[in-house]
Amino acid sequence: MKLKGLILLCLTAILLGGCRIEPPLNLRQSVKTRLVLDARVDVQVMWQVNWQSQWNFNWNTAAYGPVGYNMPGSMRAHVYSHNAFGDKSAHNVYNFLGESTTLDVFVGIHDFLFHNNDSEAILFRSDGEMSDINAYTRIISSGLRASSQVFTMAHKALGLQTRADDDEIKEPVALQPDDLFSVYVPDYYISDDLNDYVYENGRYVLKLEHELNPVTFIYLFQVRLLNNAGRVVGSSAGAALTGVAAGANLMTRMSESSTVSIPMDVHMDRDQDMLGAKVYCFGIPGCNAYDSESVAAAPDGKHYFVLNISYINGTYRNIRIDVTDEVRALPLGGVIPLEIDVDDFPPEGSSGSGGFNALVNDWKDEGGYTTIIS
């Protein structure tokens, strides 16, 4: 079962005028058609059923929050028109609410990029008017605070032992993205030949149907606490997933090679001694997550689930769990169940103050891209 959310896009071109248009070839770029865009959204996607088979425990939505994607409320269409030499010569942007809108384009060859534009966290940038568009989020910190490595029960079964020393993850921390879907349709010919159109309801229409797939991917972490005996009471500072892509190219679907850590909230189901966390990210760096060969050729890297633990005596500590194999096996996101023994990271004697900065270094803007498409 394919791991993706679908947004069905129906692009309808209405040829203006009731008769066949046959301008000379050198004048065809002066003939316009009217496009009726119908972006039908279905985010009740099948991956939710598929993910249930990966869960060791049910996902308690009351404790951890909802599982999947949210339906976008507004869309953006980028239309790149080609000149007689086949080069991009014009770039127009259209924003629309809901599922449909109309716009006029010239007969000829065009590239179309569609994506939702209702994200509160995601920014878009381009190096030029005709250049590819990339999505990213703002850098909020220089890095994570020190954490001690803890091995899961599966790791310990291989003879690995938990380490007591503390290390820092030396990569910037970026704001967590949210739902982003897109589709890119290059070199699409808008024809003036009525033989290419369908006659419906008294008009000729040209239909183009595509699926908008997720650009951001969801990982759900289920952390079962063994031998807890009430010692761990939650996570005041949350968690972070390290080593993920800093952004993605909406045209090529290639994720950026540069890496960031993404913070997330953590919730506890005390009845089961279980922690749950959900994170959006741009996925594995340097690859197209929908292309298995591209994923296999992605640069090597490590991924850690860095978790702030709050104890009943008021202390806290940061632990990190190697989830490289799990993340690399799920390039489109998925469920990552973990079992850890609280005896490997018992509470310390002195009291500490919790809070978000217990996990993330001081928040600050580390700069970013300068050309932003609003």
Image: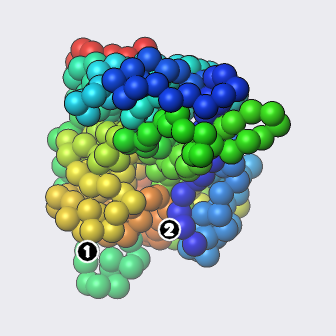
- The vertical placement of 156 against 325, above or below, is below
User: Residue at (29%, 21%) from the top-left corner?
Assistant: 89
User: Residue at (43%, 41%) from the top-left corner?
Assistant: 188
Look at the numbered disc 2 and give the secondary structure of its residue.
Answer: strand
| 307 horizontally vs 335: left or right | left
| 182 horizontally vs 261: left or right | right
Residue 264, position as x, y percentages in the image? 47, 41
| 268 horizontally vs 140: left or right | right
Given the image, on which type of amino acid does mark 2 rest? Pro
Q: Which mark is residue 337?
A: 2
Residue 23, position as x, y percentages in the image? 46, 25
Q: Can residue 339 be seen?
A: yes
Q: Quadrant of residue 78?
A: top left
Q: Seen from this angle, which residue lies furthest right?
A: 201
Q: Which mark is residue 151?
A: none
Which one is nearer the viewer's eye here, 120 or 71? 71
Given the image, on which type of amino acid does mark 1 rest? Gln
Question: Crowding at label 1, few (<14), some or many (≥20) Cα neighbours within 10 Å?
Answer: some
Q: Quadrant of the C terminus?
A: top left
Which one is nearer the viewer's eye here, 255 or 276? 255
Residue 85, position as x, y percentages in the image? 22, 30
- The vertical placement of 151 against 282, above or below, is below
Which one is nearer the viewer's eye here, 113 or 135? 113
User: Residue at (20%, 65%) from the top-left corner?
Assistant: 297
Look at the numbered disc 1 and give the secondary structure of its residue.
Answer: loop
Q: Which-is-in-front pick, marks 2 and 1?
A: 2
- The vertical placement of 160 against 139, above or below, is below
Which one is nearer the viewer's eye here, 109 or 43? 109
| 202 horizontally vs 137: left or right | right
Q: Which mark is residue 161?
A: 1
